[in-house]
Image (cartoon, helix red, strand yellow):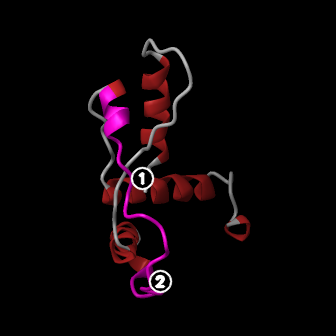
Amino acid sequence: MQYTDDVAKLFLKAATVPFMGAEVYNIRGSVVDMSEVISAIEAAAPQVRGAISYDATPLPFPDGQDDSRLTALLGPVAYTPLIDGVAATIATFRKALSDGLLTAAAL
């Protein structure tokens, strides 16, 4: 999983690197099990504890991406821990709801 703020910072960092041409790079992010995502949500929003379920059958996707070419170009890449990213995302949605910028119906 990639946290959008981390991705935005990578784009900004990439814009400052002298580079000619066009390349494609992988962003690793957090490689986690769905149970960890649910635990992070429940930690940030305890009122939903036990309300989220999922099918434990894995999807046919690779387990993460190799970001070694990206780090070779940009240097060390900082990734926000899953629990912090989920908490910040929930806080952002709560603020948007309380400020009237978003409605529960729109979610």
| Residue drawn 41% across the image and 59% down it | 86
* Magenta stretch holds residue 85: no
Mark closer to the chain start, 1 or 2:
2
What range of the chain is rendered magenta?
48-72
Residue kind at label 1, given as amino acid type: Ala
Residue kind at label 2, given as amino acid type: Ile
* Magenta stretch holds residue 65: yes
Which quadrant, please, contains the N terminus?
A: bottom left
Q: Give left or right: position of 43 versus 106.
A: left
Residue 79 rendering spot, x and y as whole percentages: 32, 44
Q: Give left or right: position of 29 versus 14.
A: left
**Where is 12 relative to 39, above or below?**
above
> Residue beneath label 1, please?
88
Badge 2: residue crowd in 10 Å (few <14, some 14–19, many ≥20):
few
Residue 57 rendering spot, x and y as whole percentages: 44, 85
Q: Quadrant of residue 44?
A: bottom left
